[in-house]
């Protein structure tokens, strides 16, 4: 699956996107965040407060308990403000 990172999540991870193959035990967005956080210091820093991270699967905003099955891409970004 392709993972996209935006704003300060991108800055902390150090890349805009990557292809990942999480293990079969990673079934939800929140489990993917936890798995990514374990991939290194930069990921741990980017996902240190998972409650503020927003996600979109295939360009649709989703809550953390959303299943990943069938997802082609997922994007992670901080909360957005209006203006």
Image (spheres, rainbow, N blue to C red):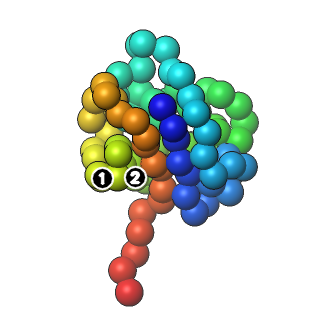
Disc ID at residue 61 = 1
Label 1 CA crowd tier, 10 Å (few <14, some 14–19, many 20+):
some
Can residue 42 be seen?
Answer: yes
**Distance of label 2 from label 1 (alpha carbons):** 8 Å
Viewer-side label of 2, 1: 1
The first of marks 2 and 1 along the sequence is: 2
Nearest the viewer among 15 and 72 is 72
Q: Quadrant of the C terminus?
A: bottom left
Mark 2 and mark 1 residues within 8 Å of each other at the beta carbon: yes
- Dot 2: element: strand
Horizontal side of residue 3 vs 52, given as left or right:
right
Q: Would you place residue 83 above or below residue 16 in this image?
A: below
Identify the residue shown where x is 35% and y is 22%: 27
Identify the residue shown where x is 69% and y is 49%: 15
Identify the residue shown where x is 61% and y is 27%: 38
Disc ID at residue 54 = 2
Q: Would you place residue 20 above or below residue 74 in this image?
A: above
Can residue 46 be seen?
Answer: no
- In percent of width and height, residue 18 lies at 61, 39
- Dot 1: element: strand
Q: Quadrant of residue 66?
A: top left
Instruction: Determine the residue located farthest toward the bottom in the rendered image.
Output: 83
- In percent of width and height, residue 53 lies at 44, 51
Nearest the viewer among 68 and 79 is 68
- In percent of width and height, residue 70 lies at 31, 28
Identify the residue shown where x is 57% and y is 63%: 7
- In percent of width and height, residue 34 lies at 50, 30
């Amino acid at each position: 699956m392709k993972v996209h990172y935006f704003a300060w999540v991108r800055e902390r991870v150090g890349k805009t996107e990557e292809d990942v193959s999480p293990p079969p035990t990673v079934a939800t967005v929140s489990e993917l965040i936890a798995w990514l956080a374990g991939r290194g210091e930069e990921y741990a820093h980017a996902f240190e407060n998972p409650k503020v991270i927003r996600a979109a699967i295939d360009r649709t905003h989703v809550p953390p308990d959303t299943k990943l099955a069938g997802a082609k891409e997922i994007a992670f970004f901080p909360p957005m403000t209006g203006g």
